[in-house]
Image (cartoon, rainbow, N blue to C red):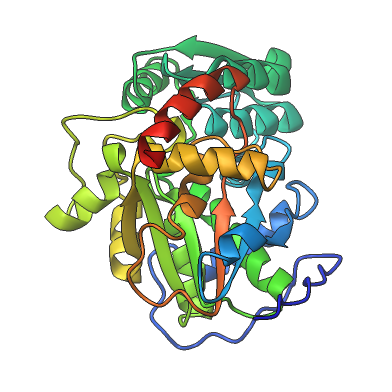
Amino acid sequence: MPVPSAPKAPTALPTTLPPHLGLPELRLGAAKVDEAARQLFGVVTRTPLQHNARLSAKTPGQVWVKREDTQPVRSYKLRGAYRLLASLDDTTTEVVCASAGNHAQGVAYACSALGIRGTVFLPSTTPPQKRARIASIGGDWITITIAGETYDDAHSAATAHSNQTGAVIVPAFDDLRTLVGQGTVAVEIIAQLGRAPDRIIVPVGGGGLLAGMATWLRARHSEVDLIGVEPEGAASMAAALTADHPVTLPDLDTFVDGAAVRRAGDITFPIIRDSGAKLVSVSTAAVCVEMLDLYQVDGIIAEPAGALATSAIGRAFDGDMGGLTVCVVSGGNNDVTRYPDVMERASHEQR
C-alpha cells in the first residue's frame, strides 16, 4: 500500500471547522475545544504528525504518530494547564497542582509565562529528570514538594494545601478547563491530515486527553474510532467502566508513571463512557519494548506513558486495523537512568 503524502500544515489553526453533525454534544462542549485551540495558538507548539513505517508494517493500513513529545514541556499537558491558568481572574496569586511530572511542567510553564506563583506536589516515583525540568521551566515562580508514593497521594497533599492557603487547584485531568485544552490535540490532527483518520489511539491515565478529544470528535467527526490504552497495572478507567462509576484500585503499578492513576476522574469517566471509546490495556514489558523501538528505530525518546498508544499496535487489537490510524506519542520526559530497567523489563516479552 502506498504511503500517503505528508499533510501540509496551515500557518494557523482553523477559525472555522467542519459543520456540526447534529449529534448530541457531551458535557464538555466541542465549541469550548475550538475556543481553546484559538487561545493556545502561538503558545503551544503545533506538533508534527508523521507517518511511521515500522508501525505501519504491523497493520494492513497506515499508522501516523502525533508528536506531543515535541512540546516545550515535552508533553501535551501544557495545553490543559495553560488553558486553565489563562482563564483565572487577575486576583489569583497562587495555584497548586498534583502531578506525576508532566502536568507540573505545564503548570510551571504557564506560571512563568503568566506571572502566577505555583506549588506542585509530586510523588516520590517522579523521575529526577522530570523534577529538574519542572524547576528549570518554572524558575522562581514554582515550589516543588514531594508527597507520598503515588499521584493520588500527591493529589491529597495538593488539596490540603489549597484548603489551608486558598491556592487555586489546577487539576491534571478532572476539570473542564483542563480537558478543553487537552482536546485541542484532536483539532490539530484533523487540520494537519485534511481529513478524519479512521481511528485515533491515545494513552489513558485519569482520562483527560481521551475525554477532551472524544468531546470534540464526537461532535465534529463521529465516524472516527477512539481507542484508549491503559497500563495493565493501572487500568483505572476500565475498572470505572466495569463498575459504571469511578473506583479506587487496591493495587497500582507505578512504572508507567504518567498514567499511574488509582482512580479515574469523576468528570472524565462519564464523558468517556458516553463517547463509545474502546479501552485496551498493555503489559509493562510491551511498553518497554515499544520505548526501545521508538528510540532505536524511529529516533523518538518516549517516556513509558508516551509509548502507551503505539505499544498497542500489533498487540491489543482483534479487529480490522486497515485505513489510517493516528497514535498520540504523549510525552518524552524519560530519564536516561531508567533505560537499564526498561531493557530488563522488555526482555520478559521477547523471551
* Depicted 78 relative to depicted 18: above or below: above
User: Can you tell which quarter of the image residue 299 is in?
Assistant: top right
Left or right, residue 274 beside residue 217? left
Q: Residue at x 63, y 21 (%)?
A: 134
**In this view of the protein, can residue 1 be seen by the observer?**
yes
Please determine whether, in this image, residue 127 is positioned above or below residue 202.
Answer: above
**Residue 218 on image: x %, y %:** 45, 75
Residue 40, image x, y percentages: 71, 52
| Residue at the farthest left position | 243
* Residue shown at 30% from the left, 29% from the top: 253
Q: Is residue 244 visible?
A: no
Residue positioned 44% across, 34% down in the render: 346
Q: Relative to 300, is 137 above or below?
A: above
Residue 304, image x and y in percent? Answer: 49, 36
Q: Is residue 51 left or right of residue 224?
A: right
Q: Residue at x 69, y 31 (%)?
A: 109
Please give the count of numbered marks on the rendered protein. Answer: 0
Between 45 and 292, the one lying in front of the other is 292
Residue 225 pos. (x, y %)? 43, 74
Q: In the image, 149: left or right of 61?
A: left
Q: Which is more toward the observer, 36 or 66?
A: 66
Q: Quadrant of the C terminus?
A: top left
Q: Residue furthest front?
A: 351
| Direction from residue 334 to residue 173 in the image, left or right | left
Q: Quadrant of the N terminus?
A: bottom right
